[in-house]
Image (cartoon, grey):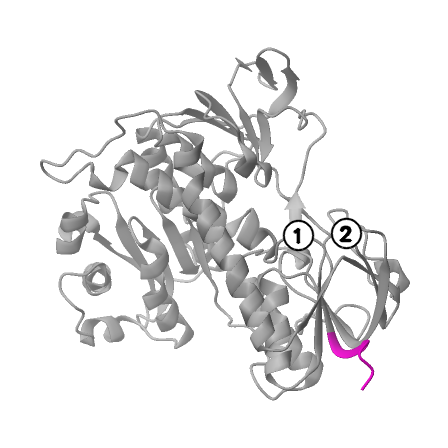
Amino acid sequence: MDSSKFDLIVIGSGPAGEKGAAQAAYFGKSVALIEKEPDLGGAAANTGTLPSKTLRETALFLSGFRNRDLSGVNLSIKHQVTIRDFLVHEQHVTQEERIRILDNLSRHRVKLFRGAGSFVDPHTISIRSNDGSETRIQGDVVLIAVGSSPFRPPIYPFDDPRVWDSDTILQLQHMPKSMLVVGGGVIGCEYACMFAILGIEVTVVEQRGRAVGSLDAEIAASLQAQMESIGIRFIFNDSVESVTANEAIDVRLKSGLELQPGAILVSSGRNGNTQDLGLDRVGVAVNERGVVRVNAQYQTEAAHVYAAGDVIGSPALASTAMEQARVAMVNAFDLKYKSDMAVILPYGIYTIPECSMAGETEESLQKQGIDYVVGKATYDSNARGHIIGDDKGFLKLLFATEDMRLLGVHVIGEQATELVHVGLTALLLKQGADLFIRTCYNYPTLTELYKYATYDALGRRAALQK
């Protein structure tokens, strides 16, 4: 067998690359994976998903946030948080994830190549290592899984150590006294919460009229109120016009407002990492943000080239990247396995508090002209909610008025990203009120909220029918 020829070549070792490679290898395909960075795992393991969520847990622990409402308990910060306090657990978790990925690739007999991969011709990939040497390999199928990088608007002096994007923030050298977060989307709000509960003065500037525009409006309003309660200041319908970084950082907004934060985090979207792949040599086009266009099978214009993960754009989640790559490989090799994605996906936002959703929002149902009824249950009326000290969280269910089939599930509060999966499963199975009423849930649990939110919806429906 030619050692330089493979059934599949994967470029990138993030969630899409790792899982795509493992899926094909599991079914007996010979697989090569190329990674140009020193560490495996892409942004998810090294700069994004896993590090940011680990930092969130560290911030919650250091601040004693989860314990503030427990009677007689005070674990609030009693000392200045150091960089080591904040980063040491993240560094440990990240290293463990890199080891796990390498072990997974090894177990599936995926051959790992170190270097930057690019197309020479439709089936030949050049791999250039850091020392300048070149290796060429061939593949019947190629999976592009190179991920994305933060978009850097030119007005920000990113060479200044006080100006960060969502990748470089993990290299911070000090804890600033104040911070400006540019962008009130998911990433911006997640980091704003982390730093705010550590006692840092945080201001969020968002050019739209609200934060996290993809959320159900009621959930978004509750999130904003709770973020403001931990000291976060929002400036909406405004944007940064200029930044000057000398001894101090001077920021001027388009409204004329002037700010002088100790640091800036810019969260202005991401670009696909496609600029050096030589995609023009295989007829694969990208848009102005470097995003690759694919069909429902994750196939590009070149029939043997597939793409998955952040490089194909929204929803750009680690969870969806893994599934996209698995589905892509099933289609590429006709594996008679899982050939398409789930029709409904969960979205988790690791702010403080957590938010999560699946299915329709009130706004989307109104636009479609679908009659619906809302059912809500609050953490402060739930025994487990009292135990954990969360008195502001709630579960919101949206049912079709006619047959009470579940249409959407929305949660804000502790464990929201876990709790949403009960509703997600019901959505995928096209179930509704009867499922939640008949199910016996453990007590005390937050999952029991599903039953009481359903009772609430049934009561509202009955009132409407009188």
Q: Is mark 2 on a helix, strand or loop?
A: loop
* Res 398 quadrant in image: bottom left
* Res 20 quadrant in image: bottom right
Q: How dense is the environment of label 2, judged by Cα within 10 Å: few (below 14), some, or many (20 and up)?
A: few
Q: Which residue lies furthest to the left in this view?
A: 72
* Image coords of residue 384 (percent x, y): 16, 55
Range shown magenta: 1-8
Q: Is residue 192 above or below residue 306?
A: above
- Marks 2 & 1, CB-CB < 8 Å contact: no
Give, as a three-letter code, the residue at label 2: Asn
Residue tagged by mark 2?
287
Alpha carbon of mark 2 to alpha carbon of mark 1: how far? 28 Å
Quadrant position of the N terminus in the picture = bottom right
Left/right of residue 41 with respect to residue 361 in the rendered view: right
* Image coords of residue 204 (percent x, y): 48, 29
- Residue at (72%, 29%) from the top-left corner? 154
Quadrant position of the C terminus in the picture = bottom left
* Image coords of residue 76 (percent x, y): 24, 31
Q: Is residue 148 above or below residue 202?
A: below
Q: Is residue 431 above or below residue 76?
A: below
Residue tagged by mark 1?
38
